[in-house]
Amino acid sequence: MPTTLTIGEFKARLSDALALVEKGETITVTYGRNKTPVAVFAPPPRAPKRKLGLLVGKATVRISPNWKMTDEEFVGS
């Protein structure tokens, strides 16, 4: 549920307003007699969940049981 505050209300209740945004609410700040919207505060977009196993059934990796690598080869020196 979006909340609308004037600039004065927003300044006076900044901590409360940010707490609401942290909970997922959107706050619109208005200015002047006409209460023109000048800013919108909203929570940041959430990162999409990564899908694991995109190559299942498309690729395989097999390591030979007698495969060996020295420390120098591993480090690249």
Image (cartoon, rainbow, N blue to C red):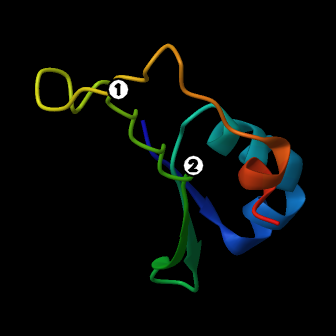
How packed mark 2 is, by other alpha carbons closer than 10 Å (few <14, some 14-19, many 20 or more), is some
Could you tell me which residue is drawn at 55 percent across and 36 percent down? 24
Q: Residue furthest top?
A: 65
Q: Is residue 13 visible?
A: no
| Crowd rating for badge 1 (residues with CA inside 10 Å; few <14, some 14–19, many 20+) | few
Tell me the residue that label 1 is attached to.
52
Q: Amino acid at mark 1?
A: Leu
State the residue at coordinates (23%, 32%): 54
Residue 2: x %, y % from top left: 45, 45
44 vs 35: above or below: above
Nearer the observer, 55 or 5:
55
Residue 11 is left or right of residue 47, and the answer is right
Write down the quadrant of residue 76 in the picture: bottom right
Of callouts 1 and 2, the N-terminal one? 2
Q: For the residue labelled by badge 2, is the local secondary structure a helix, a strand or a loop?
A: loop
The image shows residue 59, relative to residue 72, as above or below, that is above
Q: Which mark is residue 16?
A: none
Which marked residue is nearer to the observer: mark 1 or mark 2?
1
Residue pointed to by mark 2 = 43
Of 17 and 62, the residue lying toward us: 62
Figure quadrant of the C terminus = bottom right
Q: Position of residue 46 (x, y in %)?
A: 48, 43
Q: Is residue 8 left or right of residue 50?
A: right
Query: Judging from the image, what secondary structure is the residue with disc 1 in?
Result: loop
Q: Residue at x 51, y 49 (%)?
A: 26
Which amino acid, by three-letter code, is at mark 2?
Answer: Pro
